[in-house]
Amino acid sequence: MSKENKKGCSINIGGAWILGLPTAIIGHHIHGSIAWAIFDFLFYPIAWIKWLICQDVNMTIIKEAFDFFLK
């Protein structure tokens, strides 16, 4: 089927999940909520801008969020 005849909507996030997943893990650690983790995953650029402006994230929080990976 050619691209001209293709109907419908498709969402292609490409490699965005590579940045969104760690953001969601850190967001879950900061907020303690799955809902906020999903929001941070979907809107990861906005989450990072907010965290950097408000100084919500630092190396200690990142180390604690990825404690399972760093052991």
Image (tube, rainbow, N blue to C red):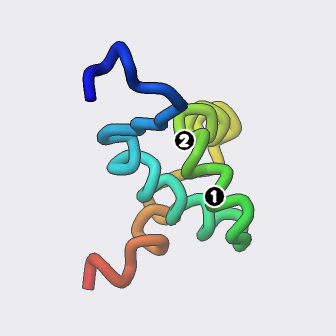
SS at badge 1: helix
Residue at 54% of width from left, 41% of height from top?
44
Q: What residue sits right under mark 1 in the picture?
A: 38
Q: Relative to 52, does residue 41 appear above or below in the rendering?
A: below
The residue to which callout 2 is attached is 44
Residue drawn at x 40%, y 25% is 6
Q: Is residue 66 left or right of residue 8?
A: left
In this picture, residue 54 sits left or right of residue 60: right
**Disc 1 + disc 2, Cβ < 8 Å:** no
For the view shown, which residue lies furthest in the top direction?
Answer: 4
- The disc labelled 2 sits on which kind of residue? Tyr
Instruction: Give the x, y percent position of residue 26.
Output: 53, 61
| Numbered disc total | 2
Residue drawn at 47 percent across, 74 percent down: 64
Name the foreground residue: 37 vs 56: 37
Which circle's residue, 1 or 2, is located before the other in the chain?
1
Q: Amino acid at mark 1?
A: Ile
Residue sitting at 65 percent across and 64 percent down? 30
Front residue of this view, candidates 44 and 71 = 44
Residue 15: percent from the left, percent from the top?
A: 30, 41
Residue 54 is situated, as x and y percent measured from the top left of the image, at: 70, 38
The local secondary structure at tag 2 comes to helix
State the CA–CA distance, disc 1 to disc 2: 10 Å
Q: 62 or 5, which lies in front?
A: 5
